[in-house]
Image (cartoon, rainbow, N blue to C red):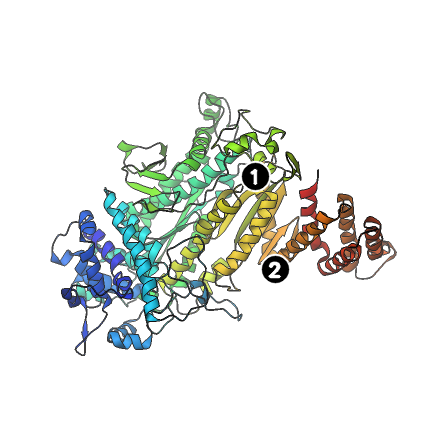
C-alpha cells in the first residue's frame, strides 16, 4: 500500500477512539496510554488510547488490507499520535485535524493543555448529543430552535428533537448498543477480498457514515454540530492533499508541515458539474414518450454515474484516492486536491476527455463543466471557507458561460444519418444504429432502464483490456449486476438494509413496476393503448406513464373506477441554497460544517424520499432526486399527497429552521403529453413559486400558494369529501357552480371599484345561497355546507380552485 493511502486511512480513523471512549468500555491495553500527551503530570486526550485499542482489536482486518513498511509508517502510530506528533507523517494528521476543525493554533494549544477531568467539567462528552447542522444556519432574525439527534444508525426516518436529560449510565448504554451494531458490520469486512484501496476505503467510509453520523466530533466549549463522521471524512481529505503537496515539492518535514496556519495556498477545491441534465433526460424531438419509463430512469442514473466517474478521473490524474472526494450529489462533485503547478492543465485534460465523449453521445446537448479555487491553511482557520465555496461556484458559472467545444460537433453528422437510414425514433436527433430504428445510446438506455429495478451492484473498470458492458470516457466502463464481482470499483446501489461489505451509493431511482396482480387489474384492462411496441406487459417490467396515470383512479365498487387518469409532475428544490452556504454560518464556519450541511441535505432526497415513495407512493416514478432538488412523475393525486409529505417532513428534518424551505411546481396533464412538455411546464410552475415573495411556495393549476395555505386547502378538500359521502345530492354539477362563484368573488375582490359590468359578479353570495338551498333542500347539512363554502371563498378566493379542481378530477366518471 502506498504511503498516501496509509495517511488517508490513518486520518479516517484518527478519532475513532471517541466512539470507544464514550461507551464506557474499560478493557484497554495499558501500553496504549503511551499515545496520550502529558500536561502537568496528567494524561490528556484519552481518546487516542482508545484509537490505539481499536487498531489492536481489529488488527486482522486492517493488516489484511494494508502493508506496514516500517515503524514510522505504522498506521496505528500515525493515527493515534495526532495530539503529540513526533514525525512528519504524524504531523500530517495533526495539521489536518486542526484545519478540519477550524481551530487556530493558540485555541488548539489551549484545548490541548486541558486534562481529561477538566474537559469533563467543561462539558460532558458522554451526555452531549449532536446539534443538528440546520440549527446553526441563520439568514434572518427569526428564532432558530436548537434540536439534537438521537444515537441511532443512519436511517430514512431521522429527525432532530429536544435534548433529553440523561444520566451518564443511560448515555453509555445508548453508545454501547450503537457500538455493538458498528462492530457487527465492521467484522463483515473480513468476508470481502478487496482488490484495491479504493474499494476498501469506500466500504469503511460507508460503515463510519452509518454509525458515526450522529456522534458529536467534539464538545469542548461548544454544542457540537459536526458529526464525528464528517470530521473524520474532512480530515482524511485534507491529510491526503497535504501529504501530496509536501511530497511533490520535497517538503515532507515536521517543521514545514507544522506551519499549517499560513497564507500559502497548498490546496485547491475542484468542482465538476453535469450541465444540461434536463435537456439530456427529456428529449424535445422524436417520439419522446416511447420507452419513457425505462429511458428516463436510465438517463438519470447515467448522470449520477458520469458524475461519479468524472470525479474518479480527477483522482486518477492527481494520483489521489477516494478520500479526496468531499461531496458528490445531484450531478455535481467537489474534490480537495493539492495545489500543484500543473493542476489547471490536469483539470483541462479531464474536461476535454469527458466532453469529447458527450459530443459523440449527445452532439453537444450536454457538457461537463469544471472549475477550481485555491485554499490556504488560514482559509480553513479564519472562517473563509464559505466565501471560498462561493468563489468556486462563481468560477464554475464562468466556465459554463465560456464553454468552447473541444472538437467539431456536427463534422460528420449528415453522413452518419444518411448511412444509418435516419435519426433515432426516440430522441429524434441522433443517428440511428445500423440495422435499428434507434440510436446506440437509446438502445443502451432502454436496456439499462430494464435492468435497473432488478440490480443491486454497480461495477466499474478503468482498464481498457477489461472493458465492461457500458462504455464511458477515458477507457472507463461499467456494468449493472445482481451480485458483486471483482472490479476496480464496486458499489452497492440498491437495498441498503444490510451492509454487504461494499461501499454504498444512494441514488434515488425508484421505478414503479408491474406486479402479478396488475396484469389482471380491471383498472388497466380497458385503458387506451399508448405503448410503443404493443407487446404485453410482464411482471417486473417498469410501468408505462399510462399505467401510472390509471393508478390515480378510485375504486368505488368491485371492478368500477372513477376519476381522470392524469399524470402529476413534481419539480422542487431548496430555496436560497447559494445564500445558505455563503452566509448561513456567519463569520465562523469550518470545512466540516459545509460538508455536513451538503451531506444532510442530500440524504433527504436520496434517503428519506425513496423510502417514503416505496412505502406509501409505489406508483411514483423518481426521474431524479439528489443534492437539493427532485423531479418526480406519478398519478396526479399521489403527487399532490407526496408534495404535502415532502413539505411537512422537510420542516422537521431541518430542525424546524424557518430559513430553510423548499419551493415546488406541480403540473397535471395527460400521460401521452410529450415528456419534455411535462418537464418544461413543471419547471415554469416552479419558477412561479420562486418568484413569490419569500418563496417557500407551491404552484399548481397556475395558482401559487404558501405551503401552509396548501395544507389548509387540502384539509378543506377532506372536509368536503366527508359531506360527499353522506350527501347523495353533492353532485359534480354543484361543484362546478362553486368554481364559478369563486371566479365571481375573485373578480369583485380585485376590482378597484364596482362598475356596471361587475354587478352580476357581486351577486355571488346570493347565487351561492340559492344553489346550495336548492341542491340540499331537505338536508340538515345545508346551512353548514353554505357556511363552509362562504367562509373559505372569502378567505382564499381563487386559491380555492386548487381543492375544488382536485375533487372534480377524482370524481369524474
Q: Nearer the viewer, residue 50 or 310?
A: 50
| Numbered disc in front, either 2 or 1 | 2
**Labelled disc at residue 676:** 1
**Labelled disc at residue 718:** none
Q: Secondary structure at mark 2?
A: helix
Report x, y in % for residue 700: 63, 49
Extreme residue in the right direction: 756
In which quadrant of the rendered image does the C terminus lie? top right
Q: Earlier in the sequence, mark 2 or mark 1?
A: 1
* Residue appearing at x 69%, y 42% in the figure: 811
Instruction: Sort mark 2 into few (<14), some (14-19) or many (20+) by Cα contacts within 10 Å.
Output: some
Tell me where residue 377 sits by quadrant: bottom left
| Above-or-below relation of 82 to 155 | below
Report x, y in % for residue 59: 18, 53
Q: Are marks 2 and 1 in contact (CB under 8 Å)?
A: no
Residue 16 in view of the camera: yes
**Labelled disc at residue 708:** 2
Residue 338 in view of the camera: no
Report x, y in % for residue 69: 13, 52
Amino acid at each position: 500500500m502506498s504511503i498516501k493511502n496509509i495517511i488517508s486511512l490513518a486520518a479516517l480513523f484518527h478519532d475513532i477512539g471517541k466512539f470507544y471512549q464514550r461507551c464506557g468500555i474499560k478493557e484497554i491495553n495499558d501500553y496504549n496510554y503511551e499515545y496520550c500527551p502529558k500536561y502537568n503530570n496528567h494524561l490528556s486526550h484519552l481518546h487516542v488510547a482508545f484509537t490505539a485499542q481499536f487498531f489492536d482489536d481489529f488488527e486482522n482486518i486492517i493488516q489484511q488490507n494494508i502493508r506496514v513498511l516500517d515503524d514510522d509508517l505504522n498506521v496505528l502510530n500515525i493515527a493515534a499520535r495526532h495530539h503529540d506528533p513526533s514525525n512528519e507523517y504524524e504531523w500530517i494528521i495533526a495539521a489536518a485535524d486542526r484545519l478540519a476543525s477550524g481551530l487556530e493554533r493558540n485555541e488548539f494549544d489551549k484545548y490541548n493543555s486541558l486534562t481529561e477531568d477538566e474537559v469533563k467539567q467543561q462539558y460532558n462528552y458522554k451526555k452531549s448529543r449532536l446539534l443538528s447542522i440546520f440549527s446553526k444556519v441563520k439568514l434572518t432574525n427569526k428564532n432558530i430552535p436548537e434540536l439534537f439527534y438521537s444515537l441511532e444508525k443512519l436511517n430514512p426516518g431521522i429527525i432532530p428533537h429536544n435534548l433529553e436529560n440523561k444520566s451518564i449510565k443511560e448515555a453509555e448504554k445508548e453508545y454501547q448498543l450503537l457500538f455493538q451494531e458498528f462492530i457487527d458490520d465492521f467484522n463483515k469486512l473480513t468476508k470481502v477480498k478487496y482488490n484495491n484501496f479504493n474499494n476498501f476505503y469506500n466500504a469503511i467510509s460507508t460503515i463510519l457514515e452509518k454509525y458515526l453520523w450522529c456522534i458529536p466530533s467534539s464538545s469542548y466549549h461548544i454544542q457540537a454540530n459536526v458529526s464525528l463522521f464528517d470530521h473524520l471524512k474532512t480530515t482524511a481529505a485534507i491529510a491526503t492533499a497535504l501529504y501530496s503537496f509536501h511530497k511533490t515539492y520535497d517538503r515532507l518535514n515536521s517543521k514545514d508541515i507544522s506551519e499549517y496556519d499560513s497564507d500559502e495556498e497548498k490546496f485547491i477545491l475542484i468542482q465538476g458539474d453535469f450541465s444540461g441534465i434536463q435537456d439530456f433526460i427529456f428529449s424535445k424531438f422524436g417520439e419522446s414518450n416511447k420507452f419513457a419509463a425505462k429511458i428516463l430512469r436510465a438517463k438519470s442514473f447515467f448522470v449520477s454515474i458520469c458524475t461519479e466517474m468524472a470525479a474518479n478521473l480527477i483522482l486518477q490524474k492527481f494520483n489521489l484516492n477516494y478520500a479526496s472526494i468531499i461531496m458528490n450529489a445531484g450531478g455535481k462533485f467537489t474534490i480537495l486536491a493539492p495545489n500543484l503547478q500543473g493542476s489547471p492543465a490536469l483539470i483541462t485534460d479531464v474536461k476535454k476527455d469527458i466532453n469529447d465523449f458527450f459530443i459523440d453521445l449527445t452532439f453537444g446537448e450536454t457538457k461537463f463543466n469544471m472549475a477550481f479555487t485555491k485554499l490556504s491553511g488560514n482559509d480553513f482557520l479564519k472562517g473563509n471557507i464559505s466565501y471560498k465555496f462561493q468563489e468556486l461556484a462563481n468560477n464554475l458559472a464562468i466556465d459554463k458561460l465560456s464553454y468552447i467545444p473541444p472538437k467539431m460537433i456536427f463534422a460528420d453528422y449528415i453522413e452518419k444519418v444518411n448511412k444509418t437510414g435516419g435519426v433515432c425514433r426516440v430522441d429524434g436527433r441522433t443517428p440511428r444504429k445500423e440495422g435499428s430504428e434507434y440510436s446506440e445510446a437509446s438502445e443502451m438506455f432502454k436496456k439499462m432502464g430494464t435492468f435497473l429495478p432488478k440490480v443491486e451492484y454497480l461495477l466499474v473498470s478503468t482498464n481498457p483490456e477489461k472493458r465492461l458492458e457500458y462504455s464511458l470516457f477515458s477507457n472507463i466502463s461499467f456494468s449493472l449486476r445482481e451480485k458483486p464481482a471483482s472490479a476496480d470499483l464496486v458499489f452497492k446501489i440498491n437495498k441498503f438494509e444490510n451492509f454487504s461489505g461494499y461501499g454504498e451509493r444512494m441514488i434515488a431511482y425508484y421505478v414503479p413496476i408491474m406486479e402479478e396482480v396488475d396484469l389482471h387489474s380491471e383498472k388497466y384492462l380497458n385503458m387506451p393503448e399508448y405503448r410503443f411496441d404493443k407487446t404485453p406487459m410482464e411482471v417486473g417490467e417498469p410501468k408505462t406513464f399510462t399505467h401510472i396515470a390509471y393508478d390515480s383512479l378510485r375504486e368505488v365498487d368491485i371492478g368500477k373506477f372513477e376519476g381522470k387518469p392524469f399524470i402529476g409532475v413534481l419539480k422542487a428544490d431548496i430555496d436560497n441554497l447559494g445564500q445558505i452556504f455563503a452566509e448561513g454560518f456567519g463569520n465562523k464556519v469550518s470545512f466540516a460544517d459545509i460538508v455536513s450541511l451538503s451531506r444532510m441535505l442530500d440524504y433527504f432526497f436520496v434517503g428519506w424520499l425513496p423510502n417514503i415513495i416505496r412505502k406509501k407512493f409505489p406508483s411514483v416514478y423518481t426521474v431524479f432526486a439528489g443534492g437539493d432538488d427532485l423531479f418526480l412523475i406519478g398519478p396526479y393525486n399521489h403527487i399532490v399527497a407526496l408534495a404535502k409529505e415532502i413539505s411537512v417532513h422537510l420542516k422537521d428534518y431541518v430542525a424546524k429552521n424557518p430559513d430553510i424551505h423548499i419551493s415546488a411546481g406541480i403540473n397535471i396533464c395527460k400521460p401521452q403529453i410529450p415528456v419534455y412538455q411535462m418537464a418544461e411546464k413543471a419547471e415554469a410552475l416552479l419558477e412561479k413559486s420562486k418568484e413569490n415573495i419569500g418563496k417557500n411556495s407551491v404552484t399548481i393549476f397556475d395558482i401559487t400558494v404558501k405551503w401552509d395555505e396548501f395544507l389548509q386547502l387540502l384539509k378543506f378538500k377532506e372536509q368536503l369529501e366527508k359531506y360527499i359521502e353522506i350527501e347523495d345530492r353533492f353532485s359534480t354539477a354543484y361543484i362546478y357552480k362553486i368554481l364559478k362563484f369563486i371566479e365571481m368573488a375573485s373578480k369583485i375582490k380585485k376590482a378597484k371599484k364596482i362598475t356596471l359590468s361587475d354587478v352580476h359578479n357581486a351577486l355571488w353570495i346570493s347565487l351561492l345561497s340559492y344553489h346550495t338551498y336548492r341542491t340540499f333542500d331537505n338536508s340538515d347539512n345545508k346551512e353548514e355546507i353554505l357556511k363552509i363554502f362562504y367562509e373559505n371563498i372569502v378567505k382564499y378566493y381563487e386559491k380555492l380552485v386548487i381543492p375544488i379542481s382536485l375533487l372534480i378530477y377524482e370524481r369524474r366518471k
